[in-house]
Image (cartoon, rainbow, N blue to C red):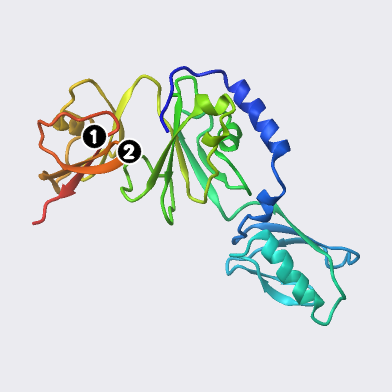
Amino acid sequence: MTATQGFPAMTGLCSLVLLLVFAAPAAAQADYTIGPQDVLSVTVWGQRDLSGRYTVELDGTFTFPLIGRVKAAGLTMRQFEEELRKLLADGYFKNPQVSVAVEQYRSQRIFLMGEIKSPGTYPLTGGMTLLEALAGAGGLGGGASTEAIIIRAQNASGPLLPGQDTSAEVITVSVKELQRGNLAQNVALRDGDTIFVPRAQEDFVYIFGAVRAQGIHPIKKDTTVLQALSLAGGLTEDGSTGRIKIIRIVDGKKKELKAKLDDIVQPGDTIIVGERLF
């Protein structure tokens, strides 16, 4: 997927979110995977004393009346409802009717960075999509590009910039197409996803490794590797000019290049500086 030019007002985006929220199927929450610290609302029909709010503890369990400790983490809402129903039917009630909902999402999170009005860490709710996440963060900033980049890595413990984890999946979405109602662009988010929105009409490279200021750095046309490294404050004492590589997306695939200081970088390149071997 590629970006397109132009950027309509965020009002249309927010309106589209409202339409999607009301049209969203109930299965979205039913397929949510429960995790530690989530707060569940459990209703056992006809049994007021059993119904209530329960917080999943760090070990993934919580204490439920009559049954004792029950494991919820790792199960979807639908699976946990069925498990609770079976436990209550085992010597307690005949054909119990159980309903479980998430009252507070606490176990899963996403990260929003870049040209977003309220960047930061947000809880991942059941069935959350890119559109909902952007609207929940207040929409895009005035200098935002027409694209959003989703960085998806396994076991991500914090936000990632494009190129920071070369094994991560990178998904580029056209926000303009999304606003036009092209829901193929409305990516379903996963735990640990980072959503990064770059600035419009400005080229960047991503510099990591043995440099003094890792991160995103704006570049001009015909910027060399040496000039780009100077934007990152230069190499650290352990950095090696002979161990510089560039990760570049070519025809949608990642390509790793050994770099020299006078090589010209391209927008979107990730420059990684290795440490000296001895």
Looking at the image, residue 144 lies above or below residue 260: above
Residue 172 in the image: state x and y as whole percent. 42, 35
Q: Is residue 20 above or below residue 176?
A: below
Whole-number angstrom distance, CA of label 2 to CA of label 1: 27 Å
Report the disc number at residue 252.
Answer: 2
Residue 232: numbered disc? 1
Q: Quadrant of residue 98?
A: bottom right
235 sits left or right of 80 in the view: left
Q: In which quadrant is the C terminus drawn?
A: bottom left
Counting other residues with Cα less than 10 Å from the Cα at mark 2, is it few (<14), some (14-19), or many (20 or more)?
Answer: few
Label 2 sits on what residue type?
A: Gly
Please indicate whether residue 204 sits to the left or right of residue 242 in the image. right
Q: Residue at x 29, y 36 (%)?
A: 251
The residue at the point 69 percent across, 37 percent down is 21
What's the amino acid at mark 1? Ala
Q: Residue at x 43, y 19 (%)?
A: 5
Q: Quadrant of residue 204?
A: top left
First along the sequence among labels 2 and 1: 1
Percent position (x, y) of residue 29?
Answer: 67, 51
x, y percentage for residue 249? 28, 37
